Image (cartoon, grey):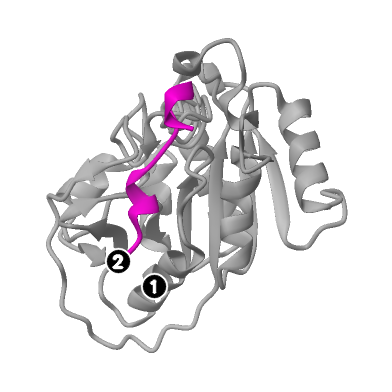
Amino acid sequence: MNEDEGTDANANGDTDANANGDTDANANGDTDANANGDTDANANGDTDANGDADVNEADTVDSGDDGQIGGVVLAAGRSRRFGEENKLLATVDGTPLVVHAVRTLLSAALTRVVVVVGHETNRVEAALDDGLGVDFSVSADIDVRYNAEYAAGQSTSVRIGARAADELEWDAAVFALGDMPWVDPETIDQLCAAYRRGTGSILAPSIDGQRGNPVLFGAAHFDALTTVTGDRGGRHLIESHDDAALIPVADPGIRRDVDEQADL
């Protein structure tokens, strides 16, 4: 694999980190990371926002590909590690974590942003509405998808995000975690630029040789992402695929998520 974390992020779960599961875990678990377990997990497999860089930096070959690239925020988890409060709704500089995460993707050069929600959906949507001033029913920029199985782990949110990306006919999708409010939008633009140069079809940012989030997956991997299970999200693809690469960036936010209140 080449230098890129991956859907460590976890699609659903708690906002902890993970795209799924508890938000703790990541993309959806807890926002901690897991896509559906705790957000702790990270869209990519790792339960933390960080992953070791087992990927190599790839050479670039201009592919001339200007296809549409969208973003997926894993924000369905329960944030169990964070305590009784919904981690995604905790604030940094007066703004909920999930609003920071979605705003980062909206600030990047992406076609559209899909937000996968689950735990306390109404409260999360209300926070996004208040923080972004968006009417989801008519917005062309944000698409909210509900994950009824968010408690089953981060992978359930990753699957929903991948299906949405395929349905919207994106050429690639950047999977981000709802509990990572410090990512620089420029990092996402760098991933997209590297993808269009032909650097790889799975790209993760890295800093000081360590893989982070968010992670970009080309459309060739959407089918595989719709079949992931457990709380590993797309990490196995990042670590085993020959076309995965790490993109060095000067952004410490790619390794910083919120798992516990002390992380704020």
Residue at which label 2 appears: 249
Q: Position of residue 235 (x, y in %)?
A: 27, 41
Left or right: residue 32 compared with residue 2 = right
163 w.r.t. 35: above or below: below
Amino acid type for the residue under numbered disc 2: Val
99 w.r.t. 19: above or below: below
Amino acid type for the residue under numbered disc 1: Gln
List the single residue furthest toward the top: 84
Residue at which label 1 appears: 190
Q: Residue at x 76, y 27 (%)?
A: 123
Q: Position of residue 79 (x, y in %)?
A: 52, 20
Q: Position of residue 13 (x, y in %)?
A: 51, 25
Q: Disc 1 or disc 2, which is closer to the eye?
A: 2
Looking at the rendering, the stretch of residues picked out in magenta corresponds to 249-264
Quadrant (top left, top right, bottom left, bottom right) of the N terminus: bottom left
How packed is label 2: few (under 14 Cα within 10 Å), some, or many (20 or more)? many
Residue 205 falls inside the magenta stretch: no
**Could you tell me if the residues under marks 1 and 2 are in contact, i.e. CB atoms within 8 Å?**
yes
